[in-house]
Amino acid sequence: MVVLLDQTRLPAEEVELVCTDVPALVEAIRSLAVRGAPLLGLAGAYGVALAAARGYDVTDAAEQLRHARPTAVNLGYGVSRAERAFRVAADGGAGYERAAAAALAEARALHREDAAASERMAAHGLALLGELLPGGGYRVLTHCNTGALVSGGGGTAFGVVRAAHRAGELRRLWVDETRPLLQGARLTAYEAAREGMAYTVLADNAAGSLFAAGEVDAVLIGADRIAADGSVANKIGSYPLAVLARYHHVPFVVVAPMTTVDLETADGGSIEVEQRPGHEVTEFAPPTVPGAGAEPGSGIPVAPLGAQAYNPAFDVTPAELVTAIVTERGVVSPVTGDALAELCSPSPSPREKSRSGNGMMDA
């Protein structure tokens, strides 16, 4: 079985969700009980291991998991790694049980790698903030949720924020509520409170007033897919923040593991953007009511009956609006396709090794 923290029940209660088969795990992914790019990769890998351990068709299980959500590339990556480990063991003459054990070992290896990547991203990101904003006392705006809830470790963008907080350099964390599912207000604020951070939740459309007042020093977000040209897909509302940041000369930094970089997707226009159900916008589902809002009509109507809703889960920010991309290998800045390809190279150049080693941008 795969045991998850049901994120749809937060912050009201911490409830474990037990998935005993792949269809249950697929539903957990689609309902956002488990979410966040790196964690989706882990869920996919463990899902393949679960299918193998229970004697299900691994190929069919992998396909179900791979297509549970379309935008986050990490999901397919995790599925493919565990499936490949199973196939290599099986094709090498191992019995079914040993092949299933190989899939589980690969999922656990990915879990360890993700935790280690979180630590390195936090270190690189904190060093980058020190370079961009000498003097400390950062006022950081973040969007959606990018902490331990999306990772096998400390998270992506929130991991950098946590590092700044523990270094005594975080003055204020501005938390976008992040429509339509309030993943900032429900989840990021939950994590910030547990860390003892000074944080403030704001409506997404209030961010502009903060920039205008000079209250934002940097924007830190995660990513669900980074295309080969450096375009970044992240939770809906990220692109407007990038535009605001550019106008107000505020660094806009993306923090994501290398598993989020997809060199097979040429540009931002090639990223498939998940469309969520319209009732998530036309109805309000109180997070304190378990299951509320899961189906049309189960929430509180906030729009006329029959109102149409546009509800993409993500938007895409072009590379020219991104100050830097922070990964566990180092920092890419300026963000270009060539620089991203260099960072992804299996045999990094001496220049890349230097950049990856100190986490700083190129001069």
Image (cartoon, helix red, strand yellow):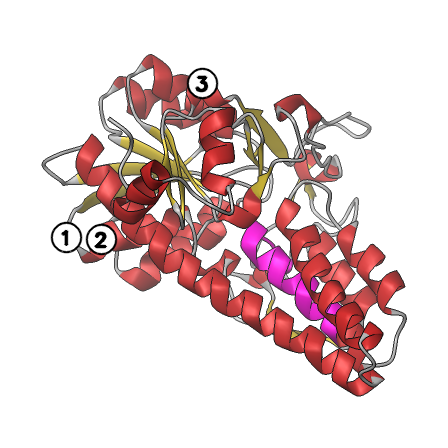
Residue under numbered circle 3: 320
- Residue 190 versus residue 102: which sits nearer the camera? 102
* Residue 31 visible in rendering: no
At label 3, the amino acid type is Glu
Range covered by the magenta-colored residues: 33-49
Residue under numbered circle 2: 165
Specify whether 306 is left or right of 337: right
* Residue 281 visible in rendering: yes
3 or 2: mark nearer the eye: 3
Residue 127 appears at what percent x and percent y? 23, 44
Residue in the picture at 62% in, 25% down: 268
Q: CA distance from mark 1 to mark 3?
A: 31 Å
- Residue 164 versus residue 184: which sits nearer the camera? 164
Where 319 falls versus 30 (above or below)?
above
Residue under numbered circle 1: 168
Q: Is residue 93 magenta?
A: no
1 or 3: mark nearer the eye: 3
In the picture, the quarter occupied by the C terminus is top left
Residue in the picture at 36% in, 17% down: 246
Q: Main secondary structure of the magenta part?
A: helix
Where 266 falls versus 31 (above or below)?
above
Q: Is residue 43 magenta?
A: yes
